[in-house]
Image (cartoon, grey):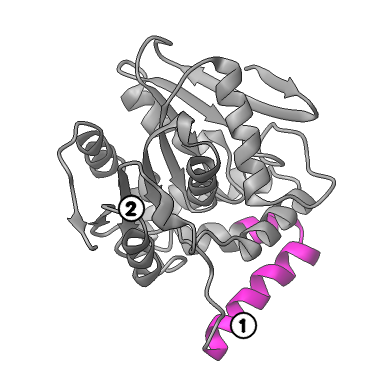
Amino acid sequence: MPLFEQNGIRLFYEVHGNPEAEPVLLLHGLGASRDMWRLQVEAWRSRYFLIVPDLPGHGDSPPLRAPITIAEMADQVAALVRHLGVGPVHGVGLSMGGMVAQEFALRHPDLVRDLVLVNTFARLPRPRSLRDRLRLWWRSWLLRVAPMRVYARQVARRMFPKPEQAALRTQAAALIARNDRRSVAYAWRAILAFDTFDRLPTLRVPTLVIHGEEDTTVPYVLCQQLAQRIPNARLKTIANSGHATPIDSPNRFNQTVESFWRGEQPGVQLA
């Protein structure tokens, strides 16, 4: 697995498939790594050229030792894509990866063919209810003081709450616990500060927003708002799916994304 090093950027990444095929960039969520895309890699490697990085401070990329922004993450990913000499890419991002994908498309439009934004948002609204404020405080507190294994179990339980998802829950907890706690805390701060709301109407690439119907981390209204802000974007809801749609519903997710790439326009257009 190669390490990309350039002007202080150090990112681990994998590539799969034929470099002459259409390139796909897969961007994982907070606390995860490139490993979360293994079901998509298995399904797509024979038809696409897959670029699967560990985002800064995650997976096998070096830990972060200073704060970072989502825009800086996007610039690092753009440098990797330029280094590989491919593009424009199909950009696919889950949660935090969807935020990086937005900045990637806004800051480097020449590198983007289209976007698939999964269970993500344009900006995090201020919590209105006591429950929402406590939930935000609890996650921030866990990241500051708890061992990563404790934080990882809490996040995995929220991602995969059903009894029949026990194996997925265990795998997710192990994946998240591998990460450096300070790096994840810096990334969490970047998410709290993230805001593309006012810039999204300038996006000019085909965009599909996917929402897991049972996602309790990113509510439907935020995905709806995202789709409304991006010109001609489409919104697709996947039933019986939570926050980790590519993992808990891989077949439906993969089929939906490939139909979008073929121009079949899944979902609905809201604006």
In the image, 79 versus 62, the foreground residue is 79
- Mark 2 falls on what kind of element? strand
> What residue appears at the point 63 percent right and 56 percent down from the top-left corner?
152
The amino acid type found where label 2 is placed reads Val
Is there any visible trace of residue 119 in the rendered image?
no
Left or right: residue 178 compared with residue 25: right
Most extreme residue toward the bottom, as rendered? 130
Is there any visible trace of residue 184 in the rendered image?
yes
Q: Verify whether residue 89 appears in magenta.
A: no
Where in the figure is residue 149, as x and y percent of width and height?
Answer: 69, 54
Q: Which residues are magenta?
A: 129-152
The amino acid type found where label 1 is placed reads Leu
Q: Which residue matches tag 1?
A: 134
Count residues near mark 1 (Cα–Cα under 10 Å), then give few for <14, some for 14-19, many for 20+. few
- Mark 1 falls on what kind of element? helix
Where in the figure is residue 27, as x and y percent of width and height?
Answer: 51, 39
Where in the figure is residue 207, as x and y percent of width and height?
Answer: 32, 46
Residue 155, above or below 15: below
Left or right: residue 13 compared with residue 162: right
Q: Verify whether residue 133 appears in magenta.
A: yes
- Quadrant, the C terminus: bottom left
Most extreme residue toward the left, as rendered? 264
In the image, 47 versus 43, the foreground residue is 47
Q: Which residue matches tag 2?
A: 209
Left or right: residue 23 compared with residue 78: left
Tally of marks: 2
The rendered magenta stretch, by its main secondary structure, is classed as helix
- Whichever of callouts 2 and 1 sits on the residue coming sooner in the sequence is 1
In the image, 233 versus 25, the foreground residue is 233
- Quadrant, the N terminus: top right
Residue 61, above or below 15: below
